[in-house]
Amino acid sequence: MLALEQFRDSTRAWLEENCPPSMRTPMVPEEIVWGGRDALFANPESKLWLDRMADKGWTCPTWPAEYGGGGLSSEEAKILAEELGRINARVALTSFGISMLGPVLLEYGTHVQKMEHIPKIVRGEIRWCQGYSEPGSGSDLASLGTKAILEGDEYVVNGSKVWTSYADKADWIFCLVRTDFEVPKHSGISFLLFDMASKGVSTKPIQLISGSSPFCETFFDNVRVPAANLMGRLNEGWSIAKRLLQHERTMISGFGLTSGQGDRGGTTSTTASLEGAAMHYRGDKDRLSDPALRDQIAQFKIDSEAFALTSQRSSEESKQGGPTATSSMLKYYGCELNKRRYELLLKAMGSQGLGWDGDEFEEEELQVTREWLRSKANSIEGGTAEVQLNIVAKRVLGLPDMLSLINKK
Amino acid sequence: MLALEQFRDSTRAWLEENCPPSMRTPMVPEEIVWGGRDALFANPESKLWLDRMADKGWTCPTWPAEYGGGGLSSEEAKILAEELGRINARVALTSFGISMLGPVLLEYGTHVQKMEHIPKIVRGEIRWCQGYSEPGSGSDLASLGTKAILEGDEYVVNGSKVWTSYADKADWIFCLVRTDFEVPKHSGISFLLFDMASKGVSTKPIQLISGSSPFCETFFDNVRVPAANLMGRLNEGWSIAKRLLQHERTMISGFGLTSGQGDRGGTTSTTASLEGAAMHYRGDKDRLSDPALRDQIAQFKIDSEAFALTSQRSSEESKQGGPTATSSMLKYYGCELNKRRYELLLKAMGSQGLGWDGDEFEEEELQVTREWLRSKANSIEGGTAEVQLNIVAKRVLGLPDMLSLINKK
Amino acid sequence: MALVLSEDQQLLRDSARHFCQDNAPISVVRRLRDEKSELGYDEAIWRQMIELGWPGMAIAEKYGGFEFGYTGLGLVLEETGRTLASSPLISSVLLGASLLSEAGNEEQKSKLLPQIVAGDLRLAVGVDEGPHHAPSRVACSAVKEGTEYILTGTKSFILDGQTADKLLVSARTSGEPYSEGGISLFMLDANAQGLQIQRTTMVDSRNAANLVMDQVRVSEDSLLGVEGAGFTALDTTLDIARIGVASEMLGSVQEIFQRIVEYLKQREQFGVQIGAFQALQHRAAQMYSEIELCRSAVLGALRCLDDPSATAKDRAIMASLAKAKLSEVSETVSNEGIQMHGGIGMTDEFDIGFFLKRARVAQQFLGDASFHRDRYATLHNF
Amino acid sequence: MALVLSEDQQLLRDSARHFCQDNAPISVVRRLRDEKSELGYDEAIWRQMIELGWPGMAIAEKYGGFEFGYTGLGLVLEETGRTLASSPLISSVLLGASLLSEAGNEEQKSKLLPQIVAGDLRLAVGVDEGPHHAPSRVACSAVKEGTEYILTGTKSFILDGQTADKLLVSARTSGEPYSEGGISLFMLDANAQGLQIQRTTMVDSRNAANLVMDQVRVSEDSLLGVEGAGFTALDTTLDIARIGVASEMLGSVQEIFQRIVEYLKQREQFGVQIGAFQALQHRAAQMYSEIELCRSAVLGALRCLDDPSATAKDRAIMASLAKAKLSEVSETVSNEGIQMHGGIGMTDEFDIGFFLKRARVAQQFLGDASFHRDRYATLHNF
């Protein structure tokens, strides 16, 4: 324990000295640091902060120091997180390389691949995107058709991906491709890494019902990828893909959590809490005057609070090694909560929650409309609500699978 | 039209003369006339009324006069119903022979069978019960195992039935039996009529969660049935069974309808309407003081009224020969409404709606508890809610059937 | 009161359906939105609707109308809901002409109603003064001075408020906000002095406006009906409009559902059509049931409007029933429209999002489900 | 505040589970019902519970208890909920002992609490006076006369009211019904003159009573706490009891769900296990999710009771949260318990109906979901 206390002291001292003042203020969306070759730093202190954290490997505290990570034990990482929290330090680097690719790269990649990619992820030098979904594949991810055919020491990739977040801003892609066409669909998939600057790669942003979005369609037209960029074994990419999805699911179920307290980002605005908005837009003072809405908001807040407690319990149980409520349940419920939240917010705001543009609405009101529309995707992306319920039914409750039952006959 | 007006006049005059005074008062449960060999008449005028109606065949107004029915056209039957309604005349005879067996017997029976059974149904001389469900068969009715094996000119019946309403009071049974064991399950079923007084028939009443019930288990131990009692063709009983189920479904969906007006049988008691009960048990005068319950009751009444309009529309459309909302949808929704009604009634009544026995509750309150429990079966009997939704999905919406899709592959 | 359509009514509905599909498909809404149309509807299509006689559907013959009843107008609105065809039918006819009919004197009616039928006059009606529907919450004041009234206050969420020739508004000549007595109805020229009309851009891309009246002077001829006794006519008008909007919502809900069912049959996942998955089947069957109830509720409400023996309270009950039910089901079905289409449903390129956007505005307009359940309960004395 | 159980707590839960399964299975409830037991619980089983120390679980050591906290008591109650084991734990311990602890003076506590721990004294608490929970709606009056109080009025729905040795009741010494001030707490002997106790037979077969006080005289020593200031202690006690009842409901809900899942795996229809049907799978998965939330809500609420830094308001919020959530989910799950078992679930021979019957009584007891959502909103200032 002494060593840990020393670590805490030295960390605190280092942060005191190295975390720039503006990095101790709440994050604003424009200043989120995504890194990459063309990284933009709206605030110069963001770059300073990233570089200092990256020098220590603390953008990825528990990753091996050998590859540029922090090399911290989980106890040390916890202390680091606490100390960062103590001074409200901003996240130095937001990246799919850290949250999605890194963990599986460390597990499945070769030493050479790790040496090449991990340090750049840690330092935010390369920005990654995910090439999973394809037009028409939907929940049946394994039905993908993007082909990679080996010609000499290169794969030639043809096909297209969809829902590629920030594909137009990413430097590299981790991509599921079909490398065997004769076997059952899950068996012929491989996991390929390649440069988005390669000849034959193009992207097109997707407009959503809520307006512009980070999502793209991505097209591969005879893209040539070195064979050494295959990660894991040939035709065994599906198990890597599934592992990576678990990370994504855990990330997305956070949606519900932030809605847990009924807050939209902790602002003090009129739309920050449901009950506040409902009272504001009705001119109520002490008590919400629409009793049916009041009951619905109370029910929502009860569910949100119970959900937040469940997330906490699940994380504590998993630390204890005991049984955990699955990530699928959290993903399902969290997303449903967030959608409910926005429907209630619309009811709270009346016609002021239905603006699209123009001066007759506050900026904040217009944002609610867009967020409401955007929330509809929560139960589709990262595995639909239906898929999560299937997983709970089969994996948690042990109910039989109709398709395989029938096949058994 | 003149003939119809004459019919109305003569009917009115006949009713005026022949409907006894006590038969023009609201029915009380103890005086419902079920007929049968051991028919009981708590009120002697009930017998008089039955006999007079049966003499004219008006217990079954549209059935052929040849078999003792009224032989009326549908226009005449409508007038009869109107005139009966005008004086609030009681139903002279309640019988599964009329509501279930009769229609299919007229369609599928031989002349000899009709001559034997229909007049006794019309006159209420024989009381029928239905032998369909078996222990374990549930929604998969065709999985039945009661066997009928031909020996000489008799079938020997072995097996058991369950949920046989009033089996302990019935004289005859119409019964689904398996007569071929080698073919797919729907194909080997026959429709058999036999006397419940036959040797080897025994019954045992079923206690429900709501208390005693008309349902029985019925056992057949080497029951010998004349081969002539087969109705329809051998091994083709399933189509008769299905036709009969349609009649049953239409009857049961009426549950929702009676709940449509929020009334329990048109009484003027405190529990007759949801809002009345809710206000009474809270001591409210002008306005229900629990606003969340008020909203739920309003929602229920809106749904009930819309459902009643839908039943009306469906019946008008079917008369017009146009497309009709199916009986499955009405059965499903009506039963769900009735269950909702009782849950709301419990909320309205608080602890006074949870009595089981004793002087601390009004008779009427105790009855609510039992009816609430009984309502839980609405979505199970006569085809479960799940089966009705399956039927809507496949027959009305034309969605594919998973089992047959897979088999096609 | 029969709940089946007559042959004439069926013919009307079929012709309205073909017209909307052929001439006013959803691509028109998309174009209007992308062009940031000021009108919020297509003038040429509206002219065609006028030629088809739609504005005069429920107006008496002596005012140039066709007396085809509100059932006829409702059927037309239902079909516009299927393709989200916007037009002044709701603002100018359902609200404007109805309010004139209910509250106006003979002179006002015989002068103006024929113009509406002919498409020469567009009205808009201003009722609410805040983000939630509350027709008795009138703070706008009208003070009499000689032969004029001076109007001051604001109105919000006025459908087609910016493009109307005349505006009908409620204002208080006496009483406190929320009291039904003391509300009077006035007709203003769109270009009256002191009147500011500000267009809002809402999520459904239709035209709605906020209005500021700063000492607007109107002559006493502009009063509709009796001073201080305007609420009854207003509320009856609102009931007519609520039922009409419910008709439009019914069309949208049916269209979304039809698209869902088609998609369930066509889309394959895991080697089978997704419509074979029982969880989706049951959700679809439940929506089907609810939509059947919606159809009956709307038809029952329209019949009630056309039933001369129905009382104002009967109409009020049916209006709140229909608007509450449709608002509730519209929310469920429009959300399922996205969810069951999956990712593609979220893209702007696909049409289903337009239905979602219109659904919420229609839900709120003239009272949401919660408002109408409360009103329904009050009308039933509980 | 950790949301995982300590090793001691897990051991306690496991031993309580085994005890209930082995000694107090559902067949006991059936027997008590069929025998029309006056007690409503089994005396021998209750004696065993006393030996296990359950009544003293949350009582301070100096009063003979074991200071294992409310979390411990909650775990025990949860297990009794799995087999519907009835006992005076709720009436005498959760309500009675807590009210003594909260409101009693040192003398009352040191005399009576040890008797409760030892099983020598059984208390019951009378709060409500009508069919709906409303602890501030006190019309019962207590008038001081010399060194005595004279109590007049009625109380209803008193759990184990007929078999208790002493009754604790709220009565008004001043103020109007619904005002929290002026409520005082009294302890009456069960055989006090003027006291009529009438057992009710409710659907869950437990013992509950109505009480009529006709000029019941008690000495001023029988007052708990300060005259007119009893509501705070009463409300805190009710919060403890609400959380305890929610724990019991949690046990029942989990048991029903477990039986459902087992049945789905075992029962075959149309040639496959019915658990393979996706519509049932999704309903089961949704129930699973809700039950996970229930588990967290109850555990969070129990922790809050045991947390010395928690305020009365914190407890009130957690109590209303837990009772509202459990009441809601209990209704859904108990209904699904019948529906998913089909016809057999409707028979009295099968056990699932007992859970349904107990569920509704527990839902109503000390406030239903609607009551607690209203309270939760008020506690959050909206």
Image (tube, coloured by chain):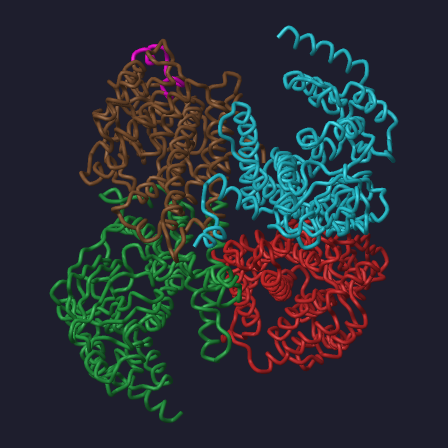
Chain colours: A green, B cyan, C brown, D red
The residue shown at (62%, 57%) is D337
Residue C101: say if magenta.
yes
Q: Position of residue C113 (x, y in %)?
A: 32, 15
Up-down relation of residue D43 to residue D53 (above or below): above
Up-down relation of residue D101 to residue C6 (above or below): below
Which quadrant would residue B259 be assigned to in this image? top right
Q: Position of residue D152 (x, y in %)?
A: 77, 52
Relative to residue D203, is residue C99 drawn left or right? Answer: left
User: Taken as a whole, is the magenta stretch helix, strand or loop?
Assistant: helix
Residue B402: say if magenta.
no
Relative to residue B376, is residue C2 drawn left or right? Answer: left
Relative to residue A89, is residue D157 drawn left or right? Answer: right
Q: Position of residue C81 (x, y in %)?
A: 35, 33
Which quadrant would residue B337 be assigned to in this image? top right
Q: Nearer the viewer, residue C291 or C158?
A: C291
Up-down relation of residue A11 to residue C181 (above or below): below
Q: Which residues are magenta?
A: C98-111
Up-down relation of residue A219 to residue B309 (above or below): below
